[in-house]
Image (tube, rainbow, N blue to C red):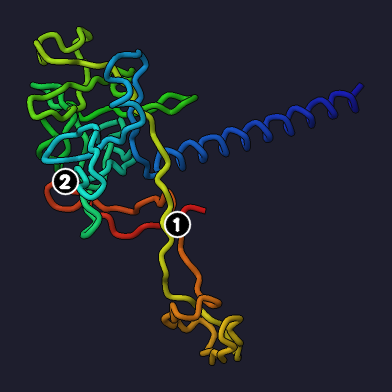
Amino acid sequence: MASIISVLVGMSAIFGTAEAIKETRSKARRSEHRSRKCNLVVRCPNSSQYSALLDNRRVVLSGDKLYVDTNTSLNTPFGHPFAGYYHPYPDTPYSGLISTISDDPPMMNWIYVDRDTYELKFGARPYAEHNFKGPWDCTRQERRLTFGGWEGFCVVLEESGFWGVHFDIDQNALSEKAAGRVVIEVELLRGEIRGVPRAKKDVVGTGKEKAEEGKKEARGKGEGDEVEINLESPGKVKVDVEASGNVECEMGEKGRVDAEKAKASE
């Protein structure tokens, strides 16, 4: 009898340990996903004459607002593509949303909902502070963007001809905020950023090696030395694929987030 009880106790301990490991791994995957930089893509849940124009279009940042990129000119880009992720908003218990606003230099701003117009805008912390700045999250299955625990995103056809992104806080199809304008309900999907290979400095070992192409002899330096790779000898070139690179950042002055470096996602 005592041996049976010991076996049951041992099995319970093993089962509890396995569940704890599973939960830890699940939280780690969720945290990694939330910190992964991604684009936002528009999807129309209801068919209309505007669906073909809006479906699968990226969200871009221009001026101080978020728009749908409906540009049809190949050589005339419109705005800066949203490329952001969740980040704890200072002095609050919830997550904020940040995005790059330029690539060179790499700068980031907070995404927020304007409390007067319900437009989605971006700016440094002083601009976001008195507006609706969170909580931002995503659905569990398709991982669509949510704000305040639900999806209420709409796009509004502005007088300029561009489609601005709004959030329907009052749940009345923006009947007051966008009276007389075309308002279309949309979903915002988090889309993986396309990876772009780039040449970087390589670390070579000790000794001499021959490049496969050109039969040129490459003289090695001491282990750990960094040398600039000759792009004319592709046999020894390694590339760093900037796929969905997570961005390490620090809060700078006035709440602006400065990206310091990007880590390649394995």
Is 90 drawn above or below residue 258 in the view shown? above
Place of residue 218 in the rendered image (x, y in percent of width and height, measured from the top left): 54, 89
Place of residue 92 in the rendered image (x, y in percent of width and height, measured from the top left): 25, 32
Task: Identify the residue at horizontal 56%, vertical 90% (top origin).
Answer: 216
Quarter-wise, where is residue 40 in the image?
A: top left
> What label sits on residue 264 in the rendered view?
1
Q: Nearer the viewer, residue 220 or 8?
A: 220
Q: What residue type is labelled 1?
A: Ala
Task: Identify the residue at horizontal 23%, vertical 38% (top origin).
Answer: 71
The reply, left or right, for residue 149 in relation to residue 222 is left
Task: Identify the residue at horizontal 63%, vertical 37% (top origin).
Answer: 21
> What label sits on residue 255 in the rendered view?
2
The reply, left or right, for residue 133 in relation to residue 261 is left
Q: Is residue 90 visible?
A: no
Classify mark 2: residues with Cα within 10 Å, few (<14), some (14-19) or many (20+).
some
Q: Can residue 146 be seen in this view?
A: yes
**Nearer-N-terminus badge (2/1):** 2
Place of residue 189 in the rendered image (x, y in percent of width and height, measured from the top left): 38, 30
Q: Nearer the viewer, residue 63 or 250?
A: 63
Q: Which amino acid does label 2 sit on?
A: Gly
Q: Which of 47 and 121 is in front in this view?
A: 47
Q: Give the Cα separation between the discs numbered 2 and 1.
A: 26 Å
Please tell me whether mark 2 or mark 1 is closer to you in this view: 1
Quarter-wise, where is residue 211 in the image?
A: bottom right
